[in-house]
Image (cartoon, helix red, strand yellow):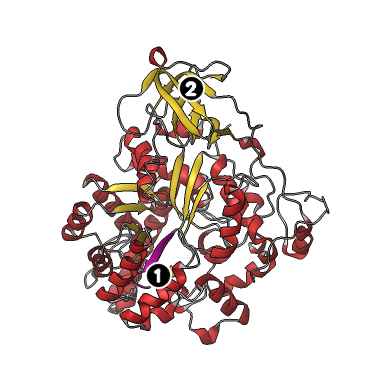
Amino acid sequence: MDSRSNRDSDSRRPAKPVVRAGVVMAACLLLWPVPAVSQESSAPLAIVGATIIDGNGGAPIIDGTLVIEGDRILAVGPAASVAVPAGAEVIDGSGKFVTPGFVDTNVHMSLAFGRGARVEEHAAYWPHHEQIILQGLQLHLKHGVTTVRDSYGVLRPMQRVKEKIDAGEEIGPRTYLAGNIVGWGGPASETFAGLPESEISFFAERMNDEVTLGSGEEMIHMAPDELRVAINAYLDYGPDFIKYGATHHFNYPAPIAFSPRAQRVIVEETHRRGLVAETHATSLEGLRLSVLAGIDLIQHPDNVGNRTITDELLDLIVERGIVCSMLINQFTGPSWQFHVRNMERAREDLAEAEAGERQRRIPPTTAEIRRRVRDTGLPQPGSVMEGRWTTKRTNAKKLIEAGCIVTVGTDNTLFGRGGVAADFLREEPENMEHQLPGLGTIFAIEGLVELGMTPSEAIIAATKNGAIASKALDEYGTLEVGKAADIVVLDVDPLADISNIRRLSMVIKGGRIIDTDALPANPIALDWAAGTLRGSR
């Protein structure tokens, strides 16, 4: 299960960007191409005459100059106060708009994102695992996402891809990896997918083990001293941060997985290594316990079991400065309109059903009431549950209005909602574009404005706050002297219309200009996920 990609001397390349299951083994012979970057030069690089939006929220610098030396920002400011070094390569930024590179704080680039029986579909792709991961990462970079945090996946192949990117052997965004969601048993487990072990295949069992690396459901049953040893054994594998499941995966039911003192052990040992500790919790009390345990970040705080977040919990999050990584792309823009249409149809169906029930005098069951609330977004007598999508949207607005540190965390994945590989679908799935690598991040940034942020605030959320999420604001996230030269150059002003973040002119990662047209360099999966955004150039 942990085999490396074959990189032998055969230089054959696929005729199409998709490798179907019947021919997938042939792709083992593919060479990975040369990284899609410009020729590295020792000369400084200067962007002159541009409007610079530095990510700190102040007024943009009109007629600004930004100078890059190596992989760092050497100078930034008004043209009158910044000298262009002799011999620098000069880029005319007249009419252009410069922002920090975007950050996505929750993506899933490996093959662990399937659920249930669907994980068997991944068997055909397993020999190409590293290429699949690289493809997804490069699609992010193609759209200006220069940093991603992968919060659930197969750690070891992702680490190998990250090492290649860091060494300059491959091109991709800066990447942080969590591996497993600690306390969950992998993609075909009870905690993640509601599957008892008696109902899964040998392949699924092995995949679960490769994802968890000893950090799975057995941890829920450990005493604190045992858990302290086990979490350190997982930390020894080298994840960049720890995400743990405070509850089971799904909205309902969502039993609490770890006791308060067990959660404190996980957070304490993670902090002892100088790493970020975060949680995935799908109930109000489950999340509250995590906040009290001292977490740094919440994944999906908009989703607390189809309930509106309480003022008490909201105050705790704000008071403690916990980062909120939100699935904005799921309930704004085209995705929200999709859900609205479905809710309208469900309400029409409910009206018909209730008319029939009045005639028959048959009261709805508790399960029926829950389904009605979920599908229609309407409150129902006898249920504490609220509409799934309406509640997420309400919670996101509450978190934004309260002044939480908000980031975009999209669940972007090459394999779609539920981990379905395109090769095994009869047709392109509906309402999927918002979750594709890179594209989903763009939709999420736009969605922040839809929910009440100004364009400037949305850019801060997607840049500065993304760096805060990894305790790396001194390294990147804003355009300041000494920071990494991760830069997006746009053709049109995003402060006038946030959708202008689609109008990419140039992406610079670590001081190197990226040939975005060449990305992904070696696409071997998902022809419908090729990475072009409707309406973009």
Task: Please state which of residues 357 and 76 is positioned toward the viewer in this rendering.
Answer: 76
Q: Is residue 347 visible?
A: no
Q: Position of residue 487 (x, y in %)?
A: 48, 33
Q: Can you tell which quarter of the image residue 125 is in?
A: bottom right
Against 390, residue 400 (above or below) is above
Type of residue at label 2? Lys
SS at circle 2: loop
Type of residue at label 1? His
The residue singled out by tag 2 in the image is 96
State which region is magenta.
241-250
Query: Is residue 244 magenta-colored?
Result: yes
The residue singled out by tag 1 in the image is 249
Task: Please state which of residues 383 and 253 is positioned toward the viewer in this rendering.
Answer: 253
Q: Residues within 10 Å of mark 2 (few under 14, many from 20)?
A: many
The single residue placed furthest to the bottom in the displayed view is 198
Q: Residues within 10 Å of mark 1 (few under 14, many from 20)?
A: many
**344 relative to 130 in the view: left or right:** left
Q: Position of residue 26 (x, y in %)?
A: 79, 60
Image quadrant for the C terminus?
top right
| First reached walking from the N terminus: tag 2 or tag 1 | 2
Q: Position of residue 361 (x, y in %)?
A: 27, 79
Q: Is residue 77 visible?
A: yes
Q: Nearer the viewer, mark 2 or mark 1?
A: 2
Q: Residue at x 62, y 77 (%)?
A: 203
Against 141, residue 288 (above or below) is below
